[in-house]
Amino acid sequence: MLRQLADGVSVHESEFCQSNAVVVQGRAGVLLIDAGVHGDELACLANDLSESGQTVVAGFSTHPHWDHLLWHAGLGTAPRYGTARCAATVQDRLSGGVEAVAKAAGIPEQVPLDLLGLITGLPAGTAQIPWDGPQVRILEHQAHAPGHAALLIEEHRVLVAGDMLSDVLIPMLDLNAADPIEDYLAALGLIEGVAGNVDVFIPGHGSAGGADQVHARIEQDRAYVHALRDARAPGDPRIGPSAKDGWDWVASVHEGQLQRLAQRRERDGAPS
């Protein structure tokens, strides 16, 4: 069910990792950001939009991970966009076929794959999503995944954060990048630069927040990344006994990141 968070902006939450699909009202239809996950949820979203007389006129994927690349026939055939680097990464990862991606990523059976990743890359440096609605500013960076983008809906003072600023997920770095720590810190700085223009922010997974929370989420993510950089215990409430019920697996993600970064330091001859 759609839940309005700000004027012209609603969210449809999935049972899968509290994933948030974002709907932005335009003049002739809606922009759909990170459409959703399970097939029945996507169908529900399509039905909700149809019953309210809304047509999807554009889609956008914030980054090239499978749970942000999904679609449903009921949502129509509107153009679906991503950054140029996001789209190129998707094309490369799908070059071996969707089934190979599904097997490698462990995608649940209830996820529809027939329209996975059919996005068009916007020209490099594109500043706004091309559609007939409120200006949506693209804040591209390289934290979490290649070509990741946060989106600022300036008229409504809403930030769509992609897979950042979550209250349930720790920062998950792109450990294949040349400098994942600095990439993430730079992205947080980019988001911090627009935080004063935000009344509502929506993470890709977890709870949305208001202007009184956005700086706290940024600082929490920054503190975690600093702890990773320094190879020390982060003391993060999203890990361990204080983690939200059902999210204990996040601790294993943290341990995996610690191990991968330690291996990188050993490989590169840097002090541990």
Image (tube, grey):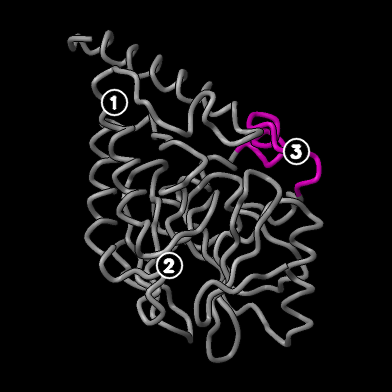
Marks 2/3 in contact by CB < 8 Å: the verdict is no
| Numbered disc in front, either 2 or 3 | 2
Q: Position of residue 238 (x, y in %)?
A: 48, 34
* Label 2 crowd bin: few (<14), some (14–19), many (20+), radius 10 Å: many
Q: Position of residue 147 (x, y in %)?
A: 38, 50
**Which of disc 3 and disc 1 is earlier in sequence?**
3
**Which of disc 1 and disc 2 is earlier in sequence?**
2
**Label 2 belongs to which residue?**
200
Instruction: Read off the magenta span.
Output: 96-111
Marks 1/3 in contact by CB < 8 Å: the verdict is no
- Against 162, is 260 above or below? above
Quadrant for the C terminus, please: top left
Q: Nearer the viewer, residue 66 or 226?
A: 226
Left or right of 124: which side holds 119? right
**Label 3 belongs to which residue?**
108
Q: Nearer the viewer, residue 210 or 31?
A: 210
